[in-house]
Structure formats: structure tokens, C-alpha cells
Image (tube, helix red, strand yellow):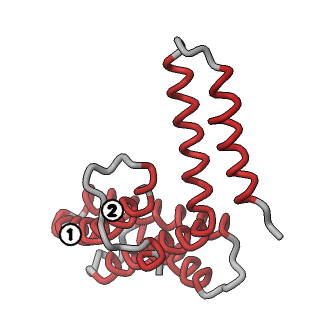
Amino acid sequence: MDQTDVGLKSVVKALTDTIAGAIDPADHLAREQLRLAANYVDFVRQRLDFIHARERYDLKHYVSLARQLLSIGLPPDMVTIAELRLHLDAAEALLGDPDARTDRTRATAMELAHAVSRIVQETHQTSGQHSAAVDRAVLSASEEKLEMERIWYQPVGFDPAPPVGVRLEDRLK
């Protein structure tokens, strides 16, 4: 049985109950850093069960965006089109693999994200007529991604108006 959750709870307890007491009360920076570290370890503990789903969500996000970009009708002679298709094919294959590891999913999502970024850059440099459509596709995809990021980081407490009534589990599907 995996004891990661218990281990992370123990780390947070050690930081807040034992180590915090050993820090000079006058050292406000050290106290603040300790609080931030303990809170982040607790955040990771809360999100641990969702990390693989989060990486798959990111991969699906970039697959969808790549498909949108390819549907715009970008000039086929763009240097980055072949690269985007290559990474999109790899990403789609990985999504179909139920045994794909989290690190491989993350790396594939990042490779596809970089290919998408290069398409955006090349479009702005060489194909002014398509740049508005590319921008719209990116902005449209970014809205949903931003909403998921807000839900993901909600336990950290930085969002002054966190989303209400939306479950992380539902967003990651």
C-alpha cells in the first residue's frame, strides 16, 4: 500500500510543529519561507492523485489546439507544419495508450506545446493573413486552460475570486 499521503502529512506536521518552533521568532523571512514550503507540500499532497489526469488534460488541450491550427488552412510550405503534424501524431498515439507513464505524457505535451508555439511564431513572421485566425484559436483554447489552472491552484489561495461549484475531477475529464 502506498504511504505517500501519510508521508507528506508527516512532513507538513514536522515543518509546522517542530521546525517552526526552532526558528528565531524575529526571523520573519525564515518563518514566511517555512510556511510557504509547508503549504506547498500540503498542496502537492492534495493534488497527488490528480497529477496523471492533469498531464493528460494538458496533452488533450494541446492536441485540440494543434488540430484547430491545422484546420485554419495554414500554408502547407510552412516549415513548422510538418513538425506540428509529427508531434500531434505522437500525442494522439500516446492518448490511446492506457499504460503511458505520467512523465512521458508530460514530455509529449511539452513537445506539442513547443510545436504549437513555433507555428504561432512562424505565422506571425510569414503569413499575416492567417495570424488573426491563429490568435483567435490560441485565445479560445487559453480561456478553458486558464479556468482549469485556477481550479488546480485553488488550494494555494492566491485567487481573489476562485471558481465556485466546479470540481477539479470534472474539469480534468
Q: Residue at x 31, y 83 (%)?
A: 71
Q: Point out the tag, 2 or 1, that comes first from the N-terminus.
A: 1
Question: Would you say the residues marked 2 and 1 are in contact, meaning their CB atoms lie under 8 Å apart?
Answer: no
Q: Position of residue 83 (x, y in %)?
A: 49, 70
Q: Residue 43 at what x, y percent from top left?
A: 54, 52
Q: Is residue 96 left or right of residue 169?
A: right
> Which mark is drawn over residue 136?
1
Q: Which residue is mark 2?
A: 146
Q: Is residue 59 above or below residue 48?
A: below
**Residue drawn at (69%, 77%) of the image:** 100
Q: Secondary structure at mark 2?
A: helix
Residue nearest the observer in this picture, 118 or 78: 118
How crowded is the residue under tag 1: few (<14 C-alpha within 10 Å), some, or many (20+)?
few
Residue closer to the observer: 71 or 79: 71
Q: Is residue 145 above or below residue 156?
A: below
Q: Position of residue 27 (x, y in %)?
A: 54, 14
Question: As rendered, which of 11 and 91 lies closer to the eye?
Answer: 11
Q: Pinpoint residue 169: horizontal percent, then vertical percent.
A: 48, 76
Label 2 to label 1: alpha-carbon separation:
15 Å
| Circle 1: element type | helix
In the rendered image, the quadrant that contains the N terminus is bottom right
Q: Is residue 152 left or right of residue 20?
A: left
Residue appearing at x 62%, y 56% in the figure: 45
Q: Residue at x 54, y 34 (%)?
A: 35
Amino acid found under the numbered disc labelled 2: Leu
Q: Amino acid at mark 1?
A: Arg
